[in-house]
Image: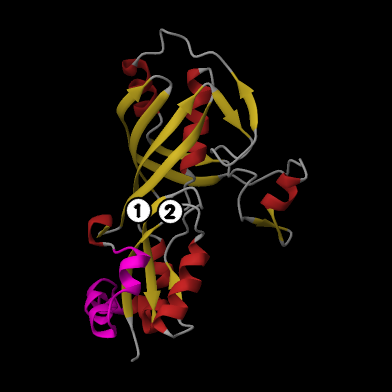
Amino acid sequence: MEFNGILLIDKPQEWTSHDVVAKLRGVLHTKRVGHAGTLDPLATGLLVVLVGTACKASQYLMSQEKAYTGTLRLGVVTNSQDADGEVLEENPVPAELTREKIAEAMRASEGDQYQTPPMFSAIKINGRPLYKAARKGLEVEREKRFIRIAKFELLDKRGNDVDFYVECTKGTYVRTIAHDLGRRLGPGAHLTALRRTASGKFSLNDAVTIEALQAMSPEEIRARLLSVHDHVPAVALL
């Protein structure tokens, strides 16, 4: 049975986006599988998977804004800006750093801006991924990217852990948002958890786990596939 369409997957932690694509190529028995927006291994949540003719819509769907919930930890800075990295700094978190002050700093982070991508990223400079240089302890000059943070809200504060919600443009590194907020507040911070809840009009509420998909019949899988023509303008499929 040939499959074509958009499949919404709830990516598990520690899997790369490519791991998901590779697994689905086996499940669906086709090499024509891609995705519309990478998630780091630490992150979970919505991965928009493209199957068959829907792969043509990759660039269009990648350009959609994304939404996430996550947690950052104040007082600890890592070399990867998230919990997968090595600790570079441990700083005391002032008692006067209240929920209100953190929320105010988050609101001040919203809007159009330029972001410097982290060294631990797959961005290539002179044909070489940055993370390979980072693993050697090297720092490479990176070109800043234009991004927009549409919304950055505090959901909860539990000790030094801050739960948040963020909406941002494609190519935005949420771990860098967390890192930069920590610098703005003083003690530093790193990302400890991230979950993508939306990509464009697609919602995590409509996603399925890989385990659940593997248990489905071909007919059930076909029923979960969204028509690319219902979600992408015809010009984007040329």
Q: Residue at x 46, y 82 (%)?
A: 32
Which residue is situated farthest in the bottom direction here?
1
Quarter of the rendering containing residue 98: top left
Residue 171: x and y, percent? 48, 52
Q: Which mark is residue 65?
A: 1
Total numbered labels: 2
Identify the mark nearer the N-term, 1 or 2: 1
| Label 1 neighbour load within 10 Å: few <14, some 14-19, many 20+ | some
**What is the basis of the colouring in this image?**
secondary structure
Residue 153: x and y, percent? 31, 32
Quarter of the rendering containing residue 9: bottom left
Residue 173: x and y, percent? 49, 45
Which quadrant: the N terminus? Answer: bottom left
Say what secondary structure mark 1 lies in: loop
**Does the magenta run of residues contain 237?**
no
- Residue placed most toward the observer, 98 or 116: 98
**Does the magenta run of residues contain 228?**
yes
Quarter of the rendering containing residue 3: bottom left
- Residue placed most toward the observer, 130 or 235: 130
Q: Residue at x 65, y 35 (%)?
A: 86
Say what secondary structure mark 2 lies in: loop
The reply, left or right, for residue 36 in relation to residue 208 is right
Q: Residue at x 30, y 79 (%)?
A: 234
Which quadrant: the C terminus? Answer: bottom left
Q: Are marks 1 and 2 in contact (CB under 8 Å)?
A: yes
Q: Which mark is residue 170?
A: 2
| Label 2 neighbour load within 10 Å: few <14, some 14-19, many 20+ | some
Residue numbers of the magenta segment: 208-234
